[in-house]
Image: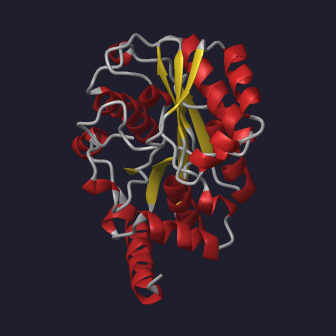
């Protein structure tokens, strides 16, 4: 890590946060938004509210971890509950853009109702190089992304969290459960439950960050680098198969290409 460069970025981030003073942080519980929230809280003398939107397509453990984080550091936190919006119930290609517009409309309304001037999100400098239609929605709505503005990359953020002794520094990146489902597929709560249970099952078996993509009654497992060979040689592999079948899948496949962003649509880079 280039400590001099990272320190310069952190000073830039702190300056941005001090200038904004009064804001809501859209808090998913992931690495980036956690770092942003923690950094803002550490500065002091800022009025901050963490807001988490709880939907059926966000894993329950993500919400639990978000609540635990804000409780640990004594940060004001509000949960907004939202059902699957009708406009994305068939998982359209523009899903991410449409979803962000809806979610951040709710967060922006909360900001106005409670006297907060700005809404911030955890987009980092790496995110702008990927295909992320949700970023267009944030820009249209005037959401600020201080991590990106300060030039902080995902590596910078993880390294700084580690230096600060924050245990989630190595938490795998997550994305909403809709990214596990083919586009133009009708979404139902049972499908989301199966995906969530299957991924949590693999997490408990020692495969964090593994994706379970769904194709009808087929579960396609995408492992992170290093896990593919491990899972193939795992003596408990049959327990994974039986566990998935109990969840409701008929067929269980292991994707030999492993985890890759946007595998449900090779023409995009959406998580």
* Residue 225 shows up from this direction: yes
Q: Nearer the viewer, residue 50 or 180?
A: 180
User: Which residue is painted at 48% across and 33% down in the image?
Assistant: 176
Is 36 placed above or below 188 here?
Answer: below
Is 203 placed above or below 1 here?
Answer: above
Picture colour scheme: secondary structure
Q: Nearer the viewer, residue 25 or 232?
A: 232
Q: On the rendered structure, is 160 left or right of 13? A: right
* Residue 268 x, y percent position in the rendering: 26, 38
Quadrant containing the C terminus in the rendered view = top left
* Residue 208 x, y percent position in the rendering: 64, 46
User: Which residue is painted at 61% across and 63% down in the image?
Assistant: 169
* Residue 45 shows up from this direction: no
User: Which residue is painted at 58% across and 11% down in the image?
Assistant: 190
* Residue 210 x, y percent position in the rendering: 57, 41
* Residue 111 x, y percent position in the rendering: 43, 42
Q: Nearer the viewer, residue 106 or 136?
A: 136
User: Which residue is painted at 31% across and 39% down in the image?
Assistant: 134
Is 244 placed above or below 41 here?
Answer: above
Q: On the rendered structure, is 119 left or right of 59? A: left
């Amino acid at each position: 890590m280039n400590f001099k460069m990272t320190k310069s970025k952190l000073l830039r981030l702190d300056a941005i946060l001090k200038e904004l003073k009064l804001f809501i942080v859209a808090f998913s519980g992931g690495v980036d938004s956690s770092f942003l929230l923690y950094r803002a809280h550490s500065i002091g003398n800022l009025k901050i509210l963490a807001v988490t939107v709880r939907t059926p397509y966000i894993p329950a453990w993500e919400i639990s971890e978000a609540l635990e984080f804000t409780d640990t550091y004594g940060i004001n936190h509000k949960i907004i509950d939202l059902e699957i919006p009708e406009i994305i119930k068939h998982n359209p290609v523009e899903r991410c853009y449409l979803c962000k517009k809806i979610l951040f409309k709710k967060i922006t309304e909360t900001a106005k109702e409670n006297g907060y001037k700005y809404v911030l999100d955890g987009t980092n400098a790496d995110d702008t190089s990927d295909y992320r239609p949700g970023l267009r929605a944030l820009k249209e709505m005037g959401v600020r992304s201080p991590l990106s503005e300060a030039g902080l990359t995902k590596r910078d953020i993880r390294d700084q969290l580690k230096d600060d002794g924050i245990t989630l520094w190595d938490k795998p990146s997550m994305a909403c459960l809709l990214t596990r489902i083919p586009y133009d597929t009708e979404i139902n709560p049972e499908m989301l439950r199966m995906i969530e249970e299957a991924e949590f099952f693999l997490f408990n078996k020692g495969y964090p960050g593994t994706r379970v993509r769904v194709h009808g009654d087929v579960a396609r497992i995408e492992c992170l680098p290093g896990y593919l060979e491990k899972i193939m040689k795992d003596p408990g592999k049959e327990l994974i198969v039986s566990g998935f079948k109990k969840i409701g899948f008929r067929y269980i496949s292991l994707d030999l290409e492993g985890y890759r962003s946007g595998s449900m649509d090779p023409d995009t880079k959406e998580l």
